[in-house]
C-alpha cells in the first residue's frame, strides 16, 4: 500500500481536517479548530495529511502548533507536535514514520528552533526513530484536603468505615502536609476571577527571567485560558502590600477536584510557596478533596515549592524534543531544555 504526505492550507482544507478528525475521535474538533488552529497569538497551526494513494482518502494527520519560549530576554520559536492520528487499518510503523519524517524535514523551513511533544506509548517509538530525544516524563503532585470524603467518594461506600479510617489517617496527613496556614498572610492580598488580571504583566516580566518556559503575555494567557472553548478556567492572584501582582495560579474546579493548570511566579521560593499555600487555603474552603499539579518531572517549579512537600503520584507519558541543528549552536537549545530552569506543564501539550 502506498501513501503520500502533504502540508495543507488549513483554511482551504478546514472542512476536510475537521471531518477526518470528527469521524475518528469522540471529542469533536469544531470549536477547538477556530480557537487553537486559527486564533493562536503565536501563529496559526501547520497541518500535514497522510493520504492513501489507491483510494485518495485521508488516513492520517499531524499538527505543529507554534509556541514561543523565552529565557533571559531571548525568544525561541517552538512547534508543539499534536493531534497526531492515523486510522486503525493504516496504523503500521511505515505510514506513521513517513508522516512524522515529512514534518521533521519541513520544520527548519518553518523557522522553528525546536519541536516538542507528549506522545502516547504507541507513538513514542515512531518519534524516537524520527530522531526525537526523550526529555523526561510528566508527574502528578497532589495536595490532599479531606481523606474521609475522598475515601467515601472514590473507594469505600460506607460512612462509618470512612470515618473510622479518617480518624487514624488524619495524623499521618498532618505529617505528610505541614500546616501551610501559619505563614504571614497579612502581607498579601488575594483575588479570584474568571478573567486574567491586567497587572500580571509585571509578574510576567519577572517570570520570563526566572524560567525557560513558554512565553507568557496578557494576550496569550487571555486566549489560552479565558477563550478556551472546553474548560472554565479561574485565576487566583496574589498581591503584595503595594497591590503589585506577585503570583498567579490558573486552575480548573471539576466537582471536588482542583487541577492547577499553570503557575506564574517570581524567583522567590518563599513567595511561590506562599502563593500555593494561600491557594490551598482557598480551595479547601470550597470543599475540594484534593488539588493536583502535573509538571515535567524536573521542572524548576518543584524546587521552589519543595517546602510544601506535595505527594508525588503517577508518572505520565514521555516528553520528547528535536532541535533545529542549524539553529542549535553549540547545543544551546538542548542545554536549556535539559537544564534545571526548564518549566513545562501538562497544559503545554498543544497550547
Image (cartoon, rainbow, N blue to C red):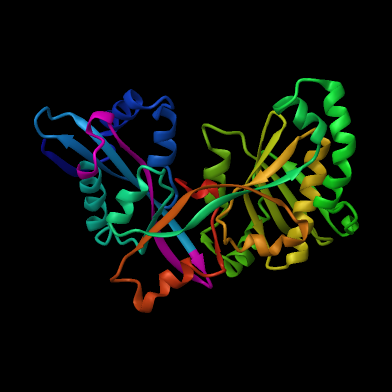
Residue 53 versus residue 266 in the image, above or below: above
- Determine the image quadrant of residue 167: top right
Residue 206 versus residue 122 in the image, above or below: below
Residue 261: image x %, image y %?
A: 61, 45
Is residue 163 visible in this depiction of the protein? yes
Extreme residue toward the bottom, this view: 330
Residue 75 located within the stretch drawn in magenta: yes
- Image quarter where the N terminus lies is top left
- Determine the image quadrant of residue 24: top left
Using residue 213 as the reference point, say whether residue 158 is left or right of it. Answer: right
Residue 274: image x %, image y %?
A: 79, 57
Using residue 242 as the reference point, say whether residue 116 is left or right of it. Answer: left
Extreme residue toward the left, this view: 54
Is residue 44 visible in this depiction of the protein? no
Residue 223: image x %, image y %?
A: 52, 44
Determine the residue positioned at 61% across, 34% down.
232
Question: Which is the main secondary structure of the residues drawn in magenta?
Answer: strand
Determine the residue positioned at 29% across, 32% down.
17
Determine the residue positioned at 62% across, 38% down.
233
Using residue 268 as the reference point, say whether residue 112 is left or right of it. Answer: left
Extreme residue toward the top, this view: 158
Residue 99 located within the stretch drawn in magenta: no
Residue 148 versus residue 214 in the image, above or below: above
Residue toward you, 155 or 44? 155
Determine the residue positioned at 63% across, 58% down.
201
Residue toward you, 224 or 136? 136
Residue 317: image x %, image y %?
A: 48, 47
* Residue extent of the magenta highlight: 70-94
Badge count: 0
Residue toward you, 95 or 333? 95
- Determine the image quadrant of residue 75: bottom left
Amino acid at each position: 500500500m502506498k501513501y503520500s504526505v502533504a502540508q495543507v492550507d488549513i483554511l482551504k482544507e478546514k472542512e476536510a481536517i475537521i471531518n477526518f478528525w470528527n469521524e475518528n475521535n469522540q471529542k469533536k474538533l469544531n470549536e477547538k479548530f477556530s480557537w487553537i488552529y486559527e486564533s493562536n497569538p503565536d501563529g496559526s497551526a501547520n497541518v500535514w495529511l497522510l493520504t492513501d494513494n489507491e483510494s485518495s482518502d485521508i488516513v492520517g494527520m499531524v499538527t505543529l502548533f507554534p509556541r514561543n519560549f523565552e529565557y533571559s530576554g531571548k525568544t525561541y520559536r517552538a512547534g508543539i507536535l499534536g493531534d497526531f492520528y492515523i486510522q486503525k487499518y493504516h496504523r503500521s510503523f511505515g505510514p506513521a514514520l513517513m508522516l512524522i519524517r515529512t514534518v521533521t524535514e519541513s520544520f527548519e523551513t518553518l523557522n522553528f528552533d525546536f519541536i516538542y511533544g507528549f506522545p502516547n506509548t504507541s507513538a513514542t517509538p515512531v518519534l524516537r526513530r524520527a530522531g526525537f530525544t526523550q526529555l523526561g516524563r510528566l508527574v502528578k503532585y497532589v495536595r490532599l484536603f479531606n481523606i474521609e470524603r475522598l475515601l467515601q467518594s472514590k473507594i469505600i461506600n460506607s460512612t462509618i468505615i470512612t470515618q473510622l479510617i479518617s480518624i487514624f489517617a488524619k495524623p499521618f496527613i498532618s505529617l505528610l502536609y505541614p500546616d501551610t496556614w501559619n505563614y504571614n498572610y497579612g502581607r498579601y492580598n488575594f483575588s479570584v476571577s474568571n478573567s486574567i488580571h491586567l497587572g500580571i504583566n509585571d509578574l510576567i516580566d519577572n517570570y520570563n527571567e526566572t524560567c525557560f518556559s513558554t512565553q507568557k503575555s496578557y494576550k496569550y494567557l487571555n486566549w489560552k485560558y479565558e477563550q478556551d472553548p472546553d474548560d472554565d478556567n479561574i485565576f487566583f492572584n496574589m498581591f503584595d502590600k503595594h497591590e503589585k501582582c506577585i503570583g498567579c495560579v490558573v486552575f480548573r474546579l471539576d466537582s471536588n477536584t482542583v487541577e492547577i493548570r499553570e503557575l506564574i511566579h517570581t524567583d522567590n521560593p518563599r513567595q511561590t510557596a506562599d502563593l500555593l499555600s494561600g491557594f490551598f487555603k482557598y480551595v479547601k474552603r470550597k470543599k475540594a478533596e484534593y488539588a493536583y499539579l502535573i509538571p515535567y518531572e524536573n521542572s524548576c517549579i518543584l524546587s521552589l515549592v519543595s517546602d510544601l512537600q506535595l505527594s508525588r503520584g503517577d508518572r505520565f507519558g514521555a516528553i520528547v524534543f528535536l532541535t533545529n541543528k542549524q539553529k542549535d549552536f553549540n547545543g544551546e537549545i538542548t542545554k536549556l531544555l535539559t537544564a534545571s530552569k526548564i518549566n513545562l506543564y501538562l497544559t503545554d501539550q498543544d497550547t
